[in-house]
Amino acid sequence: MSAFALVVVLGTACSAPGEDTSSAEVPRALPSVLPSPSQRPQEERAVDAYLGMMRALVDASLDGADDHPDLERFADGQALQLTRDMLAGHNAVATGEPVLTPQATEVDLKQDPPRVVVEDCVDETDWVMEGYESTAAEERSTRLFVATVTEQDGEWKVGELWLGEINAC
């Protein structure tokens, strides 16, 4: 089990042996530049907010920080508190990065506020906190992240974040 296994673990798409994955979502690397608002479809902007929150979380872990100024740009409410709690008290620096495969699984743009649910089987195998052992490559360490992203005043933010069991996706 790797670095953040106690509190946070960040995936490659999970599939059964022999399952056709030719149409499976391609894993996404975390963006090196945080997304900015655009005229892109609402669903994509919601996924961008999730990716921005994850970029801020990973950047803070790589710096050994217990917060990141961009967390508030992409998250609020329970999700903001959870990401800050994930970073708090580690006093260590992470190496590597998780692999993400976010997908919008529910889209309700008629709700007030508009809402998109993003699911991501996060592979944290190569994202290791100082002082912890790396997970062997053949023993991928994954965890399902489920984010509820809502639009507020033209901006999408992750308001709720749920972390599933380790290796359950």
Image (spheres, rainbow, N blue to C red):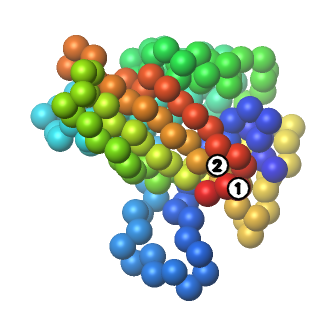
Going by the numbered disc 1, the residue's amino acid type is Asn
Whether residue 12 is situated above or below residue 63 in the rendered picture: below
* Label 1: which secondary element: loop
Label for residue 93?
A: none
Write the residue at 17% across / 41% down.
41
Number of callouts: 2
Residue sitting at the far bottom: 18
Q: Residues within 10 Å of mark 1 (few under 14, many from 20)?
A: some
Residue in front for this viewpoint, 125 or 158: 158
Q: Residues within 10 Å of mark 2 (few under 14, many from 20)?
A: many
Going by the numbered disc 2, the residue's amino acid type is Arg
* Label 2: which secondary element: strand
Q: In this view, does 157 lie to the left or right of 136?
A: left
Label for residue 143?
A: 2
Could you tell me how far apart the alpha carbons at marks 1 and 2 are, in whole angstroms?
A: 5 Å
Residue in front for this viewpoint, 87 or 103: 103
Whether residue 89 is situated above or below residue 129 in the rendered picture: above
Whether residue 51 is situated above or below residue 68 in the rendered picture: below
Whether residue 13 is situated above or below residue 96 in the rendered picture: below
Label for residue 167?
A: 1
- How far across and how far down the image is residue 7, in percent? 74, 32
Circles 1 and 2, Cβ within 8 Å, touching? The answer is yes
Residue sitting at the far left: 39
- How far across and how far down the image is residue 84, in percent? 62, 18
Write the residue at 55% across / 71% down.
15
Q: Does residue 132 appear anywhere in the picture?
A: yes
Q: Does residue 127 appear anywhere in the picture?
A: no
